[in-house]
């Protein structure tokens, strides 16, 4: 256990160093080829700026909100680079979205601070996240210093590897594969591969894009049904929800996520391989061919990193969707008891913490009846407490998958953020009191709502 | 400055000295024939100018570039962009047809362009033999494919080593007429090695090699 902590700390350091080194090489090669080598310094200043984050993390208290913020900014920073690259790729696919902006970046006064800022934005969230992770590692280890020393060793080792290899690196060759969009896409990909906080496991892009889609479709359909139609419209029957569920279910949204991620890179690829080649002016046909040939080979070279990205996303998508099918997390209900008309659920005990983001279920036996309650922390930090059942399905309960709870009966995923909203296959919310240690629920509240589920009144009302 | 300039160029093989301090200047657009007895160093001289062979001492400047100092990669680029070669043997790819053989040369230069290749074959009078393979072409026709191939990338210099060595008089005349027409149209420089006095009369200048040296250098009337 303790040696694996040391190993993980080393790995975190090494990974960050390798990531920074790779980005540095690619960026430096790119700048060299476009003859803007002087700008590369600002990238390093950006890294220095990003180091404020670990300083902050190590000196000031780390609250759960801060952790939440960090993990969200890791995603956001990836999204920023991906969206920028997509935008630039679209530009490079013949859309010519830029122009004035392009000219502005020709000026160092503008390009340098932008580079500094982007570099800081690129590294800051990961630095912060990894610092938090190291602190957590240090907590479980008797000698915290060993953890930090090990992480530092990882960083030094990684940087030394690049320093040793620096003479072997063919800057012109590497640079010839990159234009600005490819550069952004590539470093976004590095972030994705070395992303998250731990190791390579944090390939988090597809689920988060997918989550975005699912939320959108779910909210959209929900709004349409609840506001534009009467709530007890016959379409709200389980079978109908089953059908509509496809729209915001994992399958549809993951295809939509894949399409959203790949649309612009694919457009760029088809432009690179099939797009028209301008007929150059030249003295002889051979010269004309030569100019055209150079143009085409440059265009193909610049498609390589985009092609890599596409392959990578497709592979990740397939492995991800394989996992999706198998990974519905269904926790075992923990028994709770009633005392003087109130059920008290502890927020934390040595075996659990209901605020850790996982789904928790509790079961109450009352007068021969088994009733289940689910508790999960929402993104905003508040706890959502509902019955483990909805108004329309038989009460088979819910499982958890990423940012959703999924109805075991009808398979409809419900975004955790919208938990307890009325209508459809949404768990029925309970009125509760939450203090520092307990969730308190009136037994009568549970009884009344569970009766409602059991009696099928919900279902009758929509008939 | 001369288009081609050799300064005391020497080539020593283990068994023989092929070139013994050759000095030579060739103007841009000149048609120069090299004659001389077998073993006198004609092919060696041509190969040295074409960068196919290196010198033991001395140096060669072509079109302002000192090719003796070029790396192998740079020499390859230099050759494919500025020099066309025709040899006594056609060296065509047997399983490609005439157009494809020409296109291959385009491909190694930059990228292939079928229309341009067809046009080039028409100019050497092979418009009716486009899709024939080398084995389906006569010796003279094969050599014309070679000329089309050698000139397809608009070289400034055409090097020809006994291009008519395998041909009868009639075909030799066709080839020479063709070269003359193309030379007049495109003004490239020609250096042609031959032992045939009939062939050496086609051109503007004849140098006679003997024992690795230039023995005689005369300007003639372009037929
Ligand atoms: N690769 C080689 N290795 C050794 N000796 C060579 C080599 N190439 C040519 N020689 C020698 O250099 C001399 C010149 O040869 P070269 O081929 O230049 O003669 P040539 O004038 O072209 O003769 P021919 O009219 O027979 O083609 C000859 O003595 C030949 O034996
Ligand atoms: Mg010879």
Image: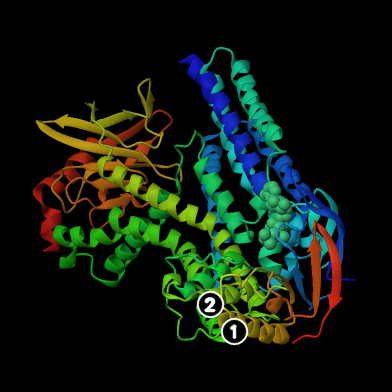
Q: Give the alpha-carbon distance from disc 1 to disc 2, as whole Å.
A: 8 Å
Q: Name the residue nearer the viewer: A305 or A346.
A: A305
Rendering coords of residue B213 (x, y %)? 84, 59
Residue beneath disc 2: B140
Residue under the point 24% across and 59% down? A246
Asked whether the viewer can see residue A120, the reply is: no
Task: Determine contact: label 1, label 2, CB under 8 Å.
Answer: yes
The chain under label 2 reads B
Give neighbour class at mark 2: few <14, some 14-19, many 20+ (Cα, 10 Å): many
Residue A457 figure quarter: bottom left
Rendering coords of residue A6 (x, y %)? 54, 19
Q: Name the residue nearer the viewer: A208 or A274.
A: A274
Left or right: A368, with A12 as reference point: left
Residue under the point 51% across and 57% down? A306
- Label total for image: 2
The chain under label 1 reads B
Quick check: A394 above or below A260?
Answer: above
Quick check: B96 above or below A153?
Answer: below
Residue beneath disc 1: B174
């Amino acid at each position: 256990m303790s040696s694996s902590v040391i190993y993980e700390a080393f790995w975190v350091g090494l990974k960050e160093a390798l990531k920074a080194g790779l980005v540095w090489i690619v960026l430096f090669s790119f700048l060299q080829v476009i003859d803007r080598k002087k700008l590369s310094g600002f990238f390093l200043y950006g890294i220095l700026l990003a180091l404020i984050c670990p300083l902050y993390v190590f000196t000031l208290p780390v609250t759960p909100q801060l952790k939440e913020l960090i993990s969200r900014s890791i995603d956001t920073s990836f999204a920023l680079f991906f969206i920028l690259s997509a935008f630039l790729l679209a530009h490079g696919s013949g859309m010519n979205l830029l122009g004035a902006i392009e000219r502005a970046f020709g000026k160092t006064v503008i390009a340098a601070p932008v580079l500094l800022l982007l570099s800081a934005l690129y590294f800051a969230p990961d630095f912060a996240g990894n610092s938090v992770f190291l602190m957590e590692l240090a907590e479980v280890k008797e000698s915290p210093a060993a953890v930090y020393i090990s992480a530092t060793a990882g960083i030094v080792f990684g940087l030394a590897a690049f320093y040793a290899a620096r003479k072997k690196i063919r800057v012109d060759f590497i640079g010839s594969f990159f234009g600005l969009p490819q550069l952004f896409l590539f470093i976004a990909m590095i972030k994705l591969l070395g992303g998250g906080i731990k190791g390579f496991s944090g390939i988090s892009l597809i689920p988060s894009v997918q989550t975005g889609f699912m939320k959108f479709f779910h909210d959209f359909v929900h709004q349409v049904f609840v506001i534009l139609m009467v709530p007890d419209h016959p379409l709200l029957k389980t079978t109908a929800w089953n059908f509509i569920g496809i729209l915001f279910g994992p399958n549809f949204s993951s295809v939509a996520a894949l399409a959203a991620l790949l649309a612009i890179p694919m457009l760029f690829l088809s432009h690179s391989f099939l797009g028209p080649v301008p007929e150059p002016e030249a003295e002889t046909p051979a010269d004309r061919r030569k100019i055209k040939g150079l143009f085409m080979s440059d265009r193909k070279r610049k498609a390589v990193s985009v092609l890599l990205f596409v392959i990578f996303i497709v592979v990740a998508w397939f492995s991800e969707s394989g996992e999706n099918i198998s990974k519905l997390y269904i926790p075992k209900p923990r028994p709770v008891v009633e005392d003087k008309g109130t059920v008290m659920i502890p927020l934390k005990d040595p075996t659990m913490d209901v605020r850790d983001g996982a789904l928790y279920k509790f079961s109450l036996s009352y007068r021969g009846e088994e009733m289940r309650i689910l508790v999960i922390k929402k993104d905003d930090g508040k706890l959502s407490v509902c019955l483990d059942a909805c108004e329309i399905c038989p009460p088979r309960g819910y499982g958890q998958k990423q940012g959703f709870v999924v109805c075991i009966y009808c398979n409809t995923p419900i975004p955790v953020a919208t938990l307890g909203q009325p209508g459809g296959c949404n768990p029925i919310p309970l009125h509760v009191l939450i203090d520092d240690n307990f969730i308190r629920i009136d037994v009568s509240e549970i009884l009344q709502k569970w009766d409602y589920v059991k009696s099928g009144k919900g279902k009758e009302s929509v008939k | 400055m001369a288009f081609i300039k050799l300064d005391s160029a020497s080539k020593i093989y283990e068994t023989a000295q092929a070139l013994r301090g050759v000095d030579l200047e060739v103007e841009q657009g000149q048609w120069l024939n090299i004659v001389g007895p077998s073993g006198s160093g004609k092919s060696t001289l041509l190969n040295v100018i074409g960068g196919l062979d290196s010198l033991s001492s001395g140096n060669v400047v072509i079109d302002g570039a000192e090719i003796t100092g070029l790396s192998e990669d740079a020499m390859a680029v230099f050759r494919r962009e500025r020099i066309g070669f025709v040899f006594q043997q056609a060296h065509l790819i047997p399983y490609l047809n005439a157009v494809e053989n020409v296109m291959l040369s385009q491909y190694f230069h930059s990228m292939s362009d079928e229309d341009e290749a067809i046009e080039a074959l028409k100019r050497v009078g092979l418009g009716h033999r486009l899709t024939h393979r080398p084995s389906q072409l006569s010796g003279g026709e094969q050599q014309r494919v070679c000329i089309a191939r050698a000139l397809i990338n608009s070289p400034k210099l055409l090097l020809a080593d006994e291009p008519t060595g395998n041909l009868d008089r009639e075909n030799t005349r066709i080839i020479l007429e063709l070269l003359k027409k193309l030379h007049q149209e495109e003004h490239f420089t020609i250096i042609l090695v031959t032992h045939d006095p009939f062939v050496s009369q086609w051109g503007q200048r004849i140098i006679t090699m003997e024992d690795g040296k230039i023995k005689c250098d005369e300007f003639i009337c372009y037929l």
